[in-house]
Image (cartoon, helix red, strand yellow):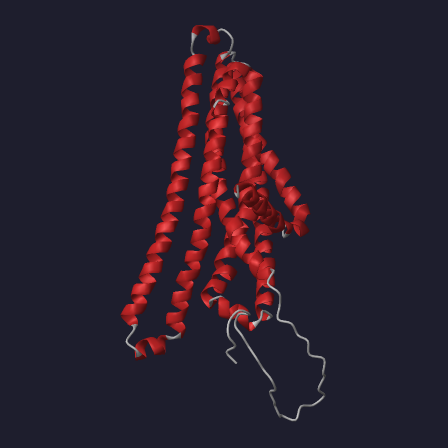
Amino acid sequence: HSFPTRRSSDLATYRRLVGYALPHWKLFVFSALAMAAYAATDTLFAALLKPMLDDSFIARDPAAIRNIPLMLMGLFLLRGVTGFISSYGMNWVGRQVIQMLRGEMFARLLHLPADYYARHTSGALVAKLIYNVEQVAQASTNAITILIRDSLTVAFLLAWMFYLSGWLATLFLVVGPVLAVLTRYVSRRYRKISRRIQDSMADVTELAGEAIEGQKVVKAFGAQDYEQAQFDKVNRKNAALQMKHIATSAAAVPITQFMAATVLAGVIYLATLDPMLDRISAGDFVSFIAAMMLLMPCLKRLSTVNPALQRGIAAAEGIFALLDTPMEPDSGTRHLERARGEVEFRNIVFRYRPEEDPVL
């Protein structure tokens, strides 16, 4: 019953995160257009194979023999330029997001009340400022780059495949529902593991910070072995969680590729039967197979984009929780032109938490 609420919460978190990229929307849109052009080059390459085989090698058309090499060079020049623009532009936006988030977080840390620092270790706060923000950048820009570019590439290649042979292209879509179910399961697992990794990183930095800052106390009490044992424990836990994350990702990719390869094998078998050989030319068949092969890396990257998104959302939750913490109230109204150097306290009471007994 909590899953729809969890999804709506994740969506709200991601929308807020993307909001940090909106001030740079012009560069974002320009980079997205470059991605679209880059995505089209895969389809253009597959399409170019048809005249290259039918007109150049089979029909021996002099014009095709002369023009196709030039077209091939121009195509890869376009691919290189658009690839650079999209990659550089999106990464520039990502670094701006990191800069803005870290600036806001540091400004908030300077004004948080003392009870906040009593409830959160310095290691956990440093982990949010350094580690979590980098995960957020992956979700806000790098993952979007893969999502836009490879989704468009898949769409263009499928359109070309349907143009060549709608019957054969339909076979490739058989894996769609299976991939959707697999992605949903993997998504939930990524989210769960990512949150545990965030907590584990906080434990690692906390223990390391305590041992470094309190090294004199550790030595005075001969507690080196104790501190080492504590650190080894959280370090092993962090490594185990990272391996769970890697195992999930590593399993999702080959499963996705195997399903796609199974369809590819079926298409090759059916396309080489006598009835189909009379419908498509050699150029059509090679172009169709090339389009399917170009789909493989796109499907692989699309299946791996989800881990970055889930890590980013989990990290953003911790960041926004810090940014939403109310600052320490400053209710002082008296302005001193010059102090006499006398300090007096009257009826001062302090608790780390409202429900606890006062410590002062």
Residue at screen point 58% across, 63% down: 105
Q: Is residue 250 above or below residue 239?
A: above
Please name whichever residue, 84 or 229, is drawn nearer the observer in this view of the structure.
Answer: 229
Q: Is residue 198 above or below residue 162?
A: below
Residue at screen point 52% across, 18% down: 170
Residue at screen point 46% across, 30% down: 296
Q: Is residue 77 above or below residue 54?
A: below
Please state the total of marks drawn on the protein image: 0
Q: Is residue 146 visible?
A: yes
Residue 252 image offset from top left, x and y in percent: 41, 36
Q: Quadrant of residue 166?
A: top right
Q: Seen in the image, is 47 located left or right of residue 256?
A: right
Residue 359 image offset from top left, x and y in percent: 50, 78
Q: Quadrant of residue 108?
A: bottom right
Q: Seen in the image, is 6 located left or right of residue 205?
A: right
Residue 4 image offset from top left, x and y in percent: 56, 41
Please name whichever residue, 228 or 59, is drawn nearer the observer in this view of the structure.
Answer: 228
Q: Is residue 75 visible?
A: no
Please name whichever residue, 284 or 115, is drawn nearer the observer in this view of the structure.
Answer: 115
Residue 244 image offset from top left, x and y in percent: 37, 46
Please name whichever residue, 45 or 147, is drawn nearer the observer in this view of the structure.
Answer: 147
